[in-house]
Amino acid sequence: MITAIRHTGLVVANLDEALSFWCDLMGFVVSKRMEESGSHIDAMMGLKDVRLTTVKLAAPDGNLIELLHFHTHPDKPVWQGQPNSTGFTHIAMTVNDLDATFALLSTAGVKFNAPPQLSPDGYAKVTYCRGPECVLLELVEVLSNE
């Protein structure tokens, strides 16, 4: 049945701001950008007269995030969920040095719930922050392979 997870889609209100965050701060690379409209996208989305820009971003390990910017059918400008909200809540990413990443993102104005925290088993350092549109990101530095 399923052979792989293809990508995670993220609707963004401000595409330029999102690209700056994901590429300039987080290190993703644009792998494909498309302007999409027509009957196929209307049917897939279950909406009429859809026009959107999609941008696929590749992480260093090849995993993809797809940014979707709707020129029609706008939604709320930010995600209003919390860590305990029903449904998808966050994207978790592994980083090499969480303290350095925390410092870099904090300097860039990214808001964190707390500084990096050591997991009780000593396996990793972790923290949550808010990306563009207030999406929750979990940043993890693995300290031990146990």
Image (cartoon, rainbow, N blue to C red):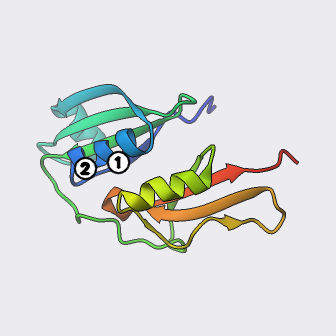
Q: Nearer the viewer, residue 40 or 50?
A: 50
Q: Where is residue 48 in the image (x, y as percent from the top left)?
A: 14, 46
Q: Is residue 7 left or right of residue 70?
A: right
Q: Is residue 119 left or right of residue 36?
A: right
Residue at 63% x, 43% y: name it: 96
Q: Position of residue 112 (x, y in %)?
A: 48, 68
Residue at 29% x, 65% y: name it: 78
**Distance of label 2 from label 1 (alpha carbons):** 6 Å
| Residue type at numbered disc 2 | Glu
The answer to whether residue 18 shows anywhere in this view is yes
Q: State the image quarter where residue 36 is shown.
A: top left
Residue at 19% x, 40% y: name it: 52
Q: What element carries label 2?
A: helix
Q: Position of residue 80 (x, y in %)?
A: 36, 72
* Residue underneath mark 1: 21
Q: Which mark is residue 17?
A: 2
| Residue type at numbered disc 1 | Phe
- The local crowd at label 1, few if under 14, some if 14 to 19, many if 20 or more residues have their Cα within 10 Å, is some
Q: Position of residue 109 (x, y in %)?
A: 35, 62
